[in-house]
Amino acid sequence: MTFLEAYAKFGPDTMAIAEALAIKEHEADRLINARLNCGYAERLHARRVKKIAYAGKEPFMSEWAR
């Protein structure tokens, strides 16, 4: 079982993931934190790209249509 499979099955339960992967609990906690930080960084980047791309305007909205 991989970490992502265990995370999908057990969620952020460090003890269950550690038992499923046969690792120590603090290592499972570190993997969970890395996964959550990665997801947050991806969402933050997507928000920044969207703000830059549209600059507060709706996409495909021409100036005369306002």
Image (cartoon, grey):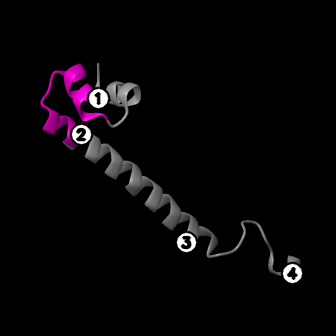
- Asked whether 26 falls inside the magenta stretch, the response is yes
- Secondary structure under tag 2 reads helix
Please tell me whether mark 4 or mark 1 is closer to you in this view: 1
Q: In which image quadrant can residue 52 be found?
A: bottom right
Mark 1 is on which residue type?
Phe
Secondary structure of the residue carrying numbered label 1: helix
Q: Considering only order in the chain, which callout, 4 or 2, is on the residue closer to the N terminus?
A: 2
Q: Mark 4 points at which residue?
A: 64
Q: Tell me the kind of residue under disc 3.
A: Ile
Mark 2 — residue? 31
Residue type marked 4: Trp
CB-based contact (under 8 Å), mark 2 and mark 4? no
Position of 65 with respect to 25 (left or right) is: right
Residues shaded magenta: 13-29
Residue plotted at (20% across, 22% down): 19
Mark 4 and mark 1: span between their CA atoms? 52 Å
The residue at the point 32 percent across, 52 percent down is 37
Mark 3 or 2, which is nearer the eye?
A: 2
Residue 5 place in picture, x, y as percent: 36, 25
Residue designated by label 3: 52
CA separation in Å, label 2 and label 1: 8 Å
Q: Nearer the viewer, mark 3 or mark 1?
A: 1
> Which residue is nearer to you in this view: 11 or 34?
11
Left or right: 38 in relation to 21: right
- The residue at which mark 1 appears reads as 3
Local SS, label 3: helix
Disc 3 and disc 1: Cα gap in Å?
34 Å
